[in-house]
Amino acid sequence: MTRIFISLIFSLLITGTASAASEQNVVVTIKPLHSLVQGVMGDTGEATLLIEGAQSLHGFSLKPSQVKSLQEAKVVFYIDKTMESFLKTALDSLPEDVHKVPFARLSGIELLERREGGAWDEHDHDHGHKHAHDDEHEHKHSDAHNHGEGAEHGLEEDNLHIWLDPEIAKSIVLAVAEELAELYPENRDIYRSNAETMTARLKELDANLKEKLTPVQGQPYVVLHDAYPYFERRYDLMAVGSLTLDPEVPASAKKLKDIRAKLEETKARCIFREPQFDDRLVQTAAEGMDIKFGTLDPLGADMEPGEDLYFNLLTRLAHNLADCLGN
């Protein structure tokens, strides 16, 4: 009798361990999204992060081990196949029961038009707002994992760096909680509780960032590439141009000339590099000009992955902008 009881307890322990381990079949593409997803998962498991370290979205390619992680996943969280282009083939080959959740397709998220590299005029500064659910962008979260991939087109002209707005991050957190609750209903209450905690933290972060950035609103600056429009819109910042559309493609002589003219015209205080890319282009654009250099990183290249990364990332963005643009 004792032996049977011990065997039963052992069996239950094994079952519990297997249930927890299955949570690791949650795959996320980039660090900021991974942070939000991990915040919702909490102690129930660990999400797999595809892009680690200082790797950039631009020119990234999957390793065999990462393809294996995708094949074994129950859910894949990402922005959009036009943003993480390395996913296109891998996602198409996944089993039909894998939930694919492109956050750019969440209902109610206002997408901004992509701005070309070079100097921006006033219309560009207004970002060309439009809504993700307008016309061909109609996409309800409730069927994201069923229909998102088939409808995923037409976003090539949109700027998809949506994660840099804490208000959008709240929508992402709620969507993650809903998706995970469907896959792991036994942890539904935990996900909802964690999502509430994350939402409260995001609200506090938003208030802190507004306070930090209010003194530098309206101060002109130039970025390496147009990765920050959602951050700019949220905090009323004034980027006046970017050096290039793609950081791995050299800017043309004409665009460099336009940028230099814009820097002089607006008396821009700062030009920002990114740690993932060579800063020769930034140095060339500012050569001979009285302008400060700063660093902005939209992905958290040198940060440790985890649920705190998102908050540390945006806090550092705000600090670097305020430090460079301030008097």
Image: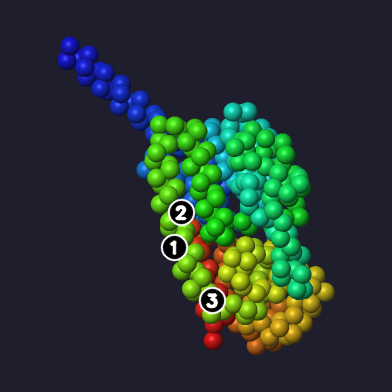
From the top left corner, tell me how far across and down residue 236 is, in percent. 61, 71
Q: Residues within 10 Å of mark 3 (few under 14, many from 20)?
A: few
Q: Is residue 150 left or right of residue 315?
A: right
Residue type of the residue flagged with mark 1: Glu
From the top left corner, tell me how far across and down residue 306 is, in percent. 44, 52
Q: Earlier in the sequence, mark 2 or mark 3?
A: 2
Can residue 326 be seen in the rendering of this structure?
A: yes
Residue type of the residue flagged with mark 3: Thr
Measure the C-alpha gap from mark 2 to mark 1. Answer: 9 Å
Residue at position x 61%, y 73% in the image: 237
Q: Is residue 63 left or right of residue 48?
A: right
Residue at position x 53%, y 59% in the image: 166
Give the numbered dot on residue 199.
2
Measure the C-alpha gap from mark 3 to mark 1. Answer: 16 Å
Q: Is residue 207 above or below residue 21?
A: below
Q: Is residue 271 above or below residue 327?
A: above
- Label 3 secondary element: helix
Give the numbered dot on residue 308.
none
Q: Quadrant of the C terminus?
A: bottom right
Residue furthest to the right in view is 254
Disc 1 designates what residue? 204
Disc 3 designates what residue? 214
Q: Nearer the viewer, residue 49 or 142?
A: 142
Can residue 70 be seen in the rendering of this structure?
A: no
Measure the C-alpha gap from mark 2 to mark 3. Answer: 22 Å
